[in-house]
Amino acid sequence: MKVNVVSRSGRDVVKGGIELNDSATVSDLQDVIYRQTKKYYPSRQRLTLPVQPGSKEKPVILSSGKKIQDYCDADTNNLTVVFKDLGTQVYYSTLFFFEYLGPLVIYPIFYYLNLYSYLGFKGERVIQPVQTYAMYCWCFHYFKRIMETFFVHRFSHATSPLSNVFRNCSYYWSFGAFIAYHVNHPFYTPVSDLQMKIGFGLAFVSQIANFYCHILLRNLRSPSGKGGYQIPRGFLFNIVTCANYTTEICQWLGFNIATQTVAGYVFLAVAAFIMTNWALAKHRRLKKLFDGKDGRPKYPRRWVILPPFL
């Protein structure tokens, strides 16, 4: 069979097309494209079926494990696919490592080094107990995230565009410095001892719950990271679709109850907004996949992320 590979503008990516046997998979096609172009390695490629001009339908993305024949009409051995260059890619583990490394390193710098003396604050700096506990809580969180990246998470996609490294690092590193500056400031006023204990208690319990949620999500995927979507079950997943995001939000809520800074609550609001959008998208996707039709299970009735609000 012959496969024509064109760009979104209609230009041939591989001149003359590619001849493949009838049992070839999309992965085989990607390998041939890489050999022909010497540049676009498989994880950099996105292959889709053409859509009619003016159509609002999303293009069908070719799955690497499927056969090319699965995307052909029954009466033809020719197929045209649209190629998109996803740009330079990095492993997701690399992306997560660097975005989490920044806050893990930046926060203790503000705690241990008297950077405020260079900003015009004179006199002896007195470190409050809440500032010490906050530093431990913060570092534990990001150390946990790095360990989960390498030893717990199984990714559905192996790589991410290099540009995401700079975007994500800007987000995490800047907020890390923003919060560390305010919590460790010489003029910082601590909350009451009871409020501190409640806040850090909520943060610790939420961290443990978040870790368990990640273990449950890991068990939904095969070691290769493939296998399609499954309905998450057990623990808080019986109540909310994205229990991992719920516990993440609760963890930062606890941290902010204990430290009580404007910077911390700004970060909580931004993070909750981002995770809520992710959760809504995943909830819609799971409800569409598991619609109870044609023998498919029906997705159970659940809150999305923050019961009883959403």
Image (tube, rainbow, N blue to C red):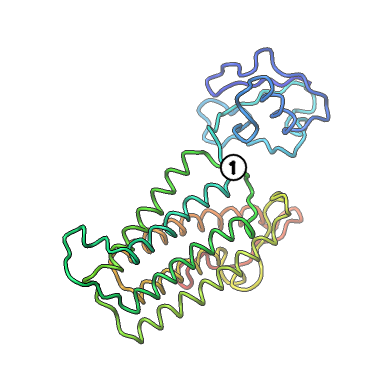
Q: Is residue 185 left or right of residue 271?
A: left
Q: Quadrant of residue 33?
A: top right
Viewer-side residue, 68 vs 103: 103
Q: Is residue 219 left or right of residue 203?
A: right
Say few, some or many: other residues with alpha carbon within 10 Å of mark 1 (under 14 / 14 to 19 / 20 or more): some
Element under label 1? Answer: strand
- Disc 1 designates what residue? 159
Farthest residue to the bottom: give it. Answer: 194
Residue at image position (65%, 21%) is 5
**Residue 297 image position (x, y, % from top left):** 71, 60
Residue at image position (67%, 35%) is 62
**Residue 96 image position (x, y, % from top left):** 52, 51
> Could you tell me the amino acid type at mark 1?
Thr
**Residue 58 image position (x, y, % from top left):** 56, 37
Residue at image position (56%, 55%) is 282
Give the answer, above or below, for where 63 lies relative to 201: above
Q: Is residue 187 left or right of residue 192?
A: left
On-image quarter of the N terminus:
top right
Give the answer, above or below, for where 6 lies relative to 144: above
**Residue 42 image position (x, y, % from top left):** 65, 32
| Tally of numbered discs | 1
Q: Is residue 13 left or right of residue 174?
A: right
Give the answer, above or below, for where 15 lies relative to 202: above
Q: Quadrant of residue 49?
A: top right
Viewer-side residue, 112 vs 38: 112
Residue at image position (57%, 26%) is 52
Q: Quadrant of residue 147?
A: bottom right
